[in-house]
Image (spheres, grey):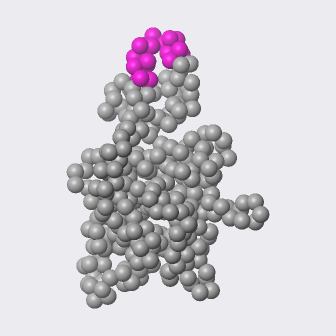
Amino acid sequence: MAPLQTLEVENPIIDSNFQQFCASHHIFSVEDFLFHDIYKLQLSTKQHSNSERLEQGITVILSIIEGQHQPWLNGMELLEEAQGNKQSISTGYERIDMLLQGGLFPGNLVEVVGPSSSGKTQICLKTAANVALHSGGSVIFFDTGNSFSPKLIDKLLGQISDSAIMKIEEVRQEVMNKIVCRSVFDIFVLINLLHQLKSNLKNMAGCSVQMLIVDSISSLVTPILGSGAHGHALMVSVGFLLKELAYEHNLSVLVTNHMVGAEGGHLKPALGESWKNIPHMRLHLSCDHKSNICSMCILRHPYITAGKAVSFSL
């Protein structure tokens, strides 16, 4: 999460006294404000000698929350934005790129959903390798299930490039160094890291980060959904934070999601109705392990009809 103490540098009003006041109401982060009655919180400041300063602090927090929303855009602005964002990022799989009319696009949050062992992680790794090799940009990879494999990336590099080039050790090292992996096993740690990344990207002119991958987002979100409204609010907060990073810094954000049982013995994407409309693009991945042939189907896309699919080999 975004702890209040991290905001004090840019907002001196959020000092130790204000933080202590918030802590007495079990508020430790900006997100915690979403679960409180602001009117009652403002009334409670009257019990303190520095009530005016506490009210100013609350106003600052509310302005920060308001600033999290994307700006209003009219139809012409949205059209110009869509037409100007034609630079695609190849996944390394020709058939998938053809299905998506070029691959993944900066500014978008893309979700790959599929059952266990369907190849979601391999697609993430190959896409990361392809970006690091051909785009000149770097990739940040948040690994939530110990699935990140540098050996597999090294093998995949040989599949997507001239083998003679990849035999040059300096080239291989340069590509591998552009993929930065961080193990994350807690939703609050992830939110913290996303806020840090947002701050770092804002302060880094000409930053070369091109892609952010979270494999898998559902591993972190599913355990908190049982807490009711609080869990769902955290899930939505993570989703919009990922979209904000993609939008503000022109990143391509790729996340994976697993499948769970539904009525009639069928499978459905995890995380439920509150999540399904957050990603710009949802792709369903399945794999026939006997033939090693996979299928990618569009569940949701800004301008491609849902239901279109391609088969390919991992």
Q: Which residues are magenta?
A: 42-59
Q: Residue at x 37, y 38 (%)?
A: 72
Where does residue 300 sit, x and y in percent of width and height? Answer: 52, 59
Q: Which residue is at the front of the view, 130 or 155?
A: 130
Please state which of residues 166 and 107 is positioned toward the viewer in this rendering.
107
Secondary structure mostly seen in the magenta stretch: helix
Q: Is residue 44 magenta?
A: yes
Residue 52 can be seen in this image:
yes
Residue 126 included in the magenta stretch of the image: no
29 is higher (above) or lower (below) than 95: above
Residue at the image position 26 percent from the left and 78 percent from the top: 171
Q: Residue furthest right?
A: 264
Looking at the picture, tell me which residue is in the foreground, 47 or 309.
Answer: 309
Residue with the most extreme bottom position: 164
Q: What residue lies at 61% left-to-right and 44% top-to-bottom? A: 231
Residue 75 horizontal/vertical position (percent): 36, 44
Q: Residue 109 in the image: state x and y as whole percent.
A: 44, 56
